Amino acid sequence: MKDLLKDIGTKKILIVSGIIVGVIVFIIIALKLFNSMFAGTSYSKIESTMVSAARKYYEKNPKMLPQMSGGVVNISSTNLTSNGHMKDLNEYTKKIDGSLSCTGSVSVTNIEGQYRYTPSLNCGDKYKTTTLVGYVRDHEPLVITGQGLYELNGGYVFRGDAPNNYVRFANHLWYITKIYDDYAYLMLADRANYRSVWDDRYNVERGSNTGINDYQVSRMRTYLENLYNSEELFTSSDKMLLTPYTLQVGNRSLSQTANDGSIEGSVTIENSYIGILPAYDYINASIDTSCVSTESNSCTNYNYMSYFDFAWWLSTGNSESTHQAYKVNLGTLDFGMANQDSRVLPVVRLVKDALYVSGDGTKDNPYVIK
């Protein structure tokens, strides 16, 4: 009987001890998570403080702002402190960790007469303001097989069935299609119902309004520019994160196999803020080795761009005709009469210093930027 009571007592002690250990472990984990969340929020607040201070400084010194569109000026947190617009960085960082040593600055970019303020905070191993491109490059390893980020044509291209390339921006989901010179190109990834004919002008060769497959004078170009200039897709704040780029709008034949941009890049439109995808970018998104041209049906394989259940236009015309342009129709590369009405998936380019906020690039947890 004594042995039985002793065993019961031992079991109770073990159970209670286990509960206590479990509670302690839970508290430790909870504290770590809280501290991590608190620190992240606090660093963000410091960045916001620097931006507010920079705005105050340039309100008093407007002549110090960049006067030309695209111009950039930088001001350090030290200068902002010496001019009385914020406390020394140590006053803010010591609330997180008294041993932190941080430096900070704010860059101001002139975007068509509007000014975008971008903070940069460097606290060594503890925290560093990160751009979206910087985060992707640090966390997405380059691959040579399977889905993921590939080094291709002098830049980086997302390829395969489901790479981690989703971005939440302007109340829509977008794909990062490629990264060149630290600029990320985004293509609309959700089901927003933007649609247009490619072109419906009178075609002399055809003797009807079947359209002319010259993107430079197309209805598509006009449609996209009007969409950009309206508030339907982008707010003025959204546009502060976008920068112009060169559209590649050359036509190609079915059998051409150069997918380095040289075909589509034979005709370009400079300084455009919005476009649609050229055919070679769709081809390059597939990792099927037999996907080599616009007539390769295999381009629908292992290609994250192939899963839309509707037809959508590409910016590339068919060089073997004057009235046809390429589209992706239920995943298959095809061409249609330019005067057909199909979906439009706009493509834009982010500024180099678009900042990473959160996310891992999956559809359920897309990258968030600011």
Image (spheres, grey):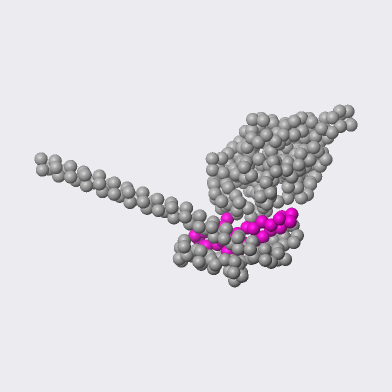
Q: Nearer the viewer, residue 243 or 285?
A: 243
Q: Is residue 297 left or right of residue 204?
A: left
Q: Is residue 61 left or right of residue 130?
A: right
Residue 109 occupies quadrant: bottom right
- Asked if the magenta segment contains residue 58, the reply would be no
Q: Is residue 268 left or right of residue 74?
A: right
| 219, above or below 242, in the image | above
- Asked if the magenta segment contains residue 120, the reply would be yes
| Residue 78 picture location, percent across and down | 59, 69
| 257, above or below 49, in the image | above
Q: Is residue 228 visible?
A: yes
Span colored in magenta: 104-130
Residue at the image point whose x is 47% and y is 62% from the top = 95
| 78, above or below 176, in the image | below
| Residue 257 picture location, percent across and down | 73, 39
Q: Main secondary structure of the magenta part?
A: strand
Residue at the image point whose x is 56% and y is 44% from the top = 366
Q: Nearer the viewer, residue 255 or 302?
A: 302
| Residue 355 picture location, percent across and down | 60, 53
| Residue 267 picture location, percent across and down | 80, 45
Residue 2 occupies quadrant: top left
Q: How many marks?
A: 0
Residue at the image point whose x is 64% and y is 30% from the top = 309
Q: Is residue 324 visible?
A: no
Q: Is residue 140 left or right of residue 285?
A: left
Residue at the image point whose x is 54% and y is 43% from the top = 365
Q: Nearer the viewer, residue 164 or 263?
A: 164
Give the position of the N terminus as an image quadrant.
top left
Q: Residue furthest bottom?
A: 82
Q: Nearer the viewer, residue 143 or 99?
A: 99
